């Protein structure tokens, strides 16, 4: 019985495997048919479209090229005898020249402010005052430069008005050219620098430039006058700074001697003398004295 049951079971397994394999084969055979059906339909549609387009083209036939248009007649607004392009209005200064001049002035303005005005002397004196007080960062640089700038405007007020009246305004109105305006505007500035420049500095810079000594001060060239004026301003600033340093130096010496006598060697004298220097500077109204001295040196 056991061998017969084994054979019967094997036969049933083979039959089941045969049925499963046959179903899988039939499903695989049907799949390309379904997948190929849309592709075949799309190909048929494209062929129909191409056939219709070809038929339409054959029915219409080729068209020949169109004839070009004839050239038109010239405009009645013909160009005048002088076709040159100008950027200026007759009787008025050129706009391009004004823009170039403005850019040049903006680039040279800082150097002119430092070298041809009282700014150099004022800012050096204020910086020396700060060093004499023993406060290297108070007042800050922005405050000192701003104060020096406004004091320079007070000193240079008449000169700036003369420059505007003689050079800038006539050039803006078109009554003077750029060269004429420059020469007219440089006259008040030369007078200011010559008034505050020593003969020794003028002789030094003239000799350094290897030029003959001029017969009069008004004949000095501007390139010689500007550095001579700066040297004179630095000399005056250092003299004022020396006078400012003396009282603060005395305070430092007195405080140092007292600390040495008390045996406080490790205590910095500058730390102790700073309050006394600030008190002395406030009691004598130091800022007013310095500003008055600076403004009075240009009168």
Image: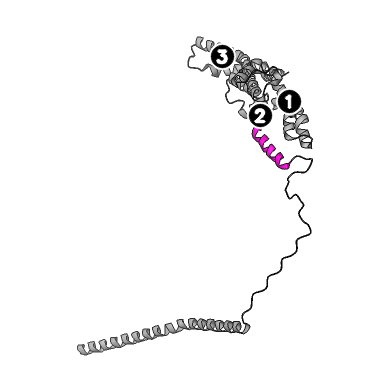
- What residue would you read off at disc 2? 112
Q: Residue at x 53, y 10 (%)?
A: 257
- Total number of numbered discs in the rendering: 3
Q: Nearer the viewer, mark 3 or mark 2?
A: 2
- What residue would you read off at disc 1? 187
Q: Secondary structure at mark 2?
A: helix
Horizontal and vertical percent position of residue 141: 61, 28
Give the dominant element type of the magenta stretch: helix, strand or loop. Answer: helix
Q: CA distance from mark 1 to mark 3?
A: 48 Å
Q: Quadrant of the N terminus?
A: bottom left
Q: Secondary structure at mark 3?
A: helix
Mark positioned earlier in the residue sequence (1 or 2): 2
Q: CA distance from mark 1 to mark 2?
A: 15 Å
- What residue would you read off at disc 3? 252
Look at the picture and state if 249 lies above or below 96: above
Residue 26 visible to the viewer: yes
| Magenta range | 94-113
Q: Quadrant of the C terminus?
A: top right
């Amino acid at each position: 019985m056991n061998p017969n049951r084994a054979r019967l079971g094997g036969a049933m397994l083979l039959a089941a495997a045969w049925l499963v394999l046959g179903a899988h084969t039939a499903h695989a055979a049907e799949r390309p048919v379904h997948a190929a059906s849309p592709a075949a339909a799309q190909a048929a549609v494209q062929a129909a479209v191409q056939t219709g387009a070809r038929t339409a083209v054959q029915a219409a036939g080729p068209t020949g090229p169109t004839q070009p248009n004839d050239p038109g007649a010239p405009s009645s607004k013909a160009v005048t005898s002088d076709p040159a392009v100008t950027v200026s209005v007759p009787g008025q200064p050129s706009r391009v020249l004004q823009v170039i001049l403005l850019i040049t002035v903006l680039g040279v303005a800082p150097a002119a402010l430092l070298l041809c005005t009282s700014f150099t002397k004022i800012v050096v004196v204020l910086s020396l005052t700060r060093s004499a007080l023993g406060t290297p960062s108070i007042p800050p640089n922005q405050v000192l430069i701003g104060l020096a700038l406004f004091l320079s405007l007070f000193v240079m007020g008449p000169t700036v008005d003369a420059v505007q009246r003689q050079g800038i305004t006539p050039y803006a109105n078109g009554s003077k050219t750029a060269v004429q305006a420059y020469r007219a505007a440089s006259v008040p500035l030369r007078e200011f620098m010559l008034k505050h420049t020593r003969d020794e500095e003028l002789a030094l810079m003239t000799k350094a430039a290897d030029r003959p000594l001029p017969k009069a001060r008004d004949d000095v060239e501007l390139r010689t006058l500007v550095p001579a004026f700066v040297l004179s301003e630095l000399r005056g600033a250092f003299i004022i700074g020396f006078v400012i340093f003396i009282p603060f130096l005395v305070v430092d010496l007195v405080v140092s001697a007292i600390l040495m006598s008390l045996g406080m060697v490790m205590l910095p004298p500058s730390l102790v003398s700073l309050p006394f220097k600030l008190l002395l500077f406030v009691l004598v109204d130091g800022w007013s004295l310095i500003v008055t001295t600076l403004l009075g040196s240009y009168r």
